[in-house]
Each structure stands twice: as structure tokens, then as C-alpha cells.
Amino acid sequence: MKGNPMQDRCGAHCRTTGHPCLNFPMLNGRCRMHGGKSTGRPTKHGFYTQNAMADRLELSQLTRDVNELASSLTAEHGQNSQGKATRRRMAIEMGAAQISLAG
């Protein structure tokens, strides 16, 4: 880039026309489409994946505990005709009641 920056052009080869790009360049000498501001989406691996796996493991364990509590509560009260969602909701309510009594 020499002289007036408004006279400079990107100059990247356009695949569709075969001519150089006529957009104004940024500081790196290319336009926003041929040398853009972003380097792409940040990659998340390693530490983030380990956290996600730990969260999923904890969630699945909590789900198992709730289902076990629901089945034990329905077995105690003899309410086997209820659906799974109703038993789970009842177990959650009973668990919340036990927590509020303990705390």
C-alpha cells in the first residue's frame, strides 16, 4: 500500500470473473472477504470437552437417582398405574419436600 489508501485495491484473484478484486484493502493489504478480520470460530477441545463429559455424567447419575426414587416411592404407595413422567414429577416433589425439611 503506497500513497493514498483509497486508491489501493485488494487485488485478490476472483474465481468467478478472473479479474482482481476491486474492494478496498484493510491494513493487511486484503479486503474483508479475502483476508478478513476473523480467523474463524474458536475451537473448543480438551478442557471444555472434559467439563462437558463430566456434566453429562453427573446429569445422567441424577436422572438415575430420580428414577430410582420415583420407583421406590410408587412401590411404597402401590401406585403402579401412573406414567413415568408422573412418577418422576412426584419423586422430584418428594425430594424437594425432604430437602426443605432437612434444611
Image: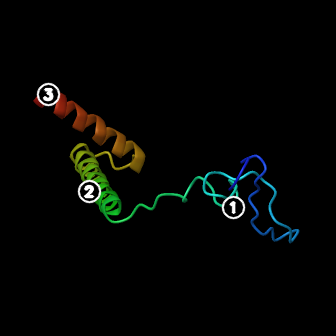
The three-letter code of the residue at mark 1 reads His
Say whether disc 3 or disc 2 marks the residue closer to the N-terminus.
2
Front one among 45 and 16: 16
- Residue lying at 61% horizontally and 57% vertically, measured from the top left: 28
The CA distance from mark 3 to mark 2 is 23 Å
Residue named by callout 3: 101
Residue at left offset 26%, top offset 56%: 61
**Vertical order, 93 against 7 (above or below):** above
Residue underneath mark 1: 34
* On-image quarter of the C terminus: top left
Residue situated furthest right in the rendering: 17
Expressed as whole percent of the image width and height from the top left, the position of residue 54 reads 28, 59
Query: Is the residue marked by circle 2 packed among few (<14), some (14-19), or many (20+) residues within 10 Å?
Result: few
For the rendered model, the colour scheme is rainbow
Of residue 102 and residue 32, the one placed in the foreground of this image is 32
* Percent x, y of residue 42: 47, 58
Mark 3, secondary structure of its residue? helix
